[in-house]
Amino acid sequence: MLKNLKSLFIIEEPDTKAPKVEKKTPSKTSPAAIPTATVQETPTGSPGKVSAQFTDVLFDAMEKANLEGFDYLEYKKSLQSLAAMPMDEATRYKSAFVMAQTMGVSPTALVATAQHYVQALVKEEKRFEQALAAQKEKQIGTKINEVHQLSQLVEQKTKQVQQLMQEIESHHKQVENLKQQVNEATQKIDSTKNDFIASYNTILATIEQDIEK
């Protein structure tokens, strides 16, 4: 059933890697257009590609929501069966629509069944979003919290480094000041010593001269 349902919407081409969604131009006699339920892709991700994994999930949701009697899916089957007939697209759509009318299905009822399947897809998309959000929280949320914690730690340590740099600068100034004090004290002591030596030598020289005389 799933493969049959898939064949109503997907054209399988052996020479292509990705499935191609069949494009049809509705005729004037076909039912009114269904309001779009298209979801915008996220700008941060790479462009989306049709995935067999996800199309199977979506078609499975449609299959589970299948209605009794002639509905939108039966209408699609009619179009598919008429595709092998030698007729143009407009005639094919008109014939499928006439077939729906012979089954007692009005245009309004046919559109309503199409909207029914749209809602089934919308519900599946909501379930996917919820599952994706949980997976995102599991895989990304923890890392985001870790990034926040590490950022706070970096900020804290940066402040500590700045404080240490200030303390080091202060210590450098203290060292230079102490060196200057040591130099000044050394010079003063050496000067005092020299004064003593000069006085000593003068007196000693005088005594020695007196002895020699």
Image: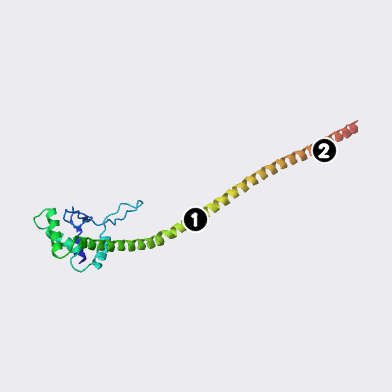
Q: Image point 48% across, 56% down: which residue?
A: 148
- Mark 2 or 1, nearer chain start: 1
Q: Position of residue 114 (x, y in %)?
A: 23, 61
Q: Position of residue 111 (x, y in %)?
A: 22, 60
Residue 110 placement, left or right of 181: left
Identify residue type, mark 1: Leu
Instruction: Name the image quarter holding residue 187.
Output: top right
- Determine the image quadrant of residue 79: bottom left
Image label count: 2
Q: In which quarter of the view is residue 38 placed?
A: bottom left
Tell me where residue 119 appears, x and y as whole percent.
28, 62
**Label 1 environment density (alpha carbons within 10 Å; few <14, some 14–19, many ≥20):** few
Q: Secondary structure at mark 1?
A: helix
Instruction: Please say if the residues under marks 2 and 1 sit with CB atoms less than 8 Å apart.
Output: no
Give me the disc on residue 7.
Answer: none
Tell me if 46 is positioned left or right of 79 in this view: right
Looking at the picture, how far across and down is residue 74, in whole percent?
A: 17, 64
At x 64%, y 44%, the residue is 172
Identity of the residue drawn at 38% across and 63% down: 134
Dot 2 corresponds to which residue? 196
Quarter the N terminus occupies? bottom left
Compare residues 159 and 195 and report the one nearer the observer: 159
Q: Secondary structure under badge 2? A: helix
Residue occupying the point 53% across, 52% down: 155
Residue that label 1 marks: 150
Q: How many angstroms separate mark 2 from mark 1 (CA)?
A: 67 Å
Question: 208 and 149: which one is in front?
Answer: 149
Quadrant, the C terminus: top right
Q: Residue furthest left?
A: 86
Left or right of 209 in this view: 66: left
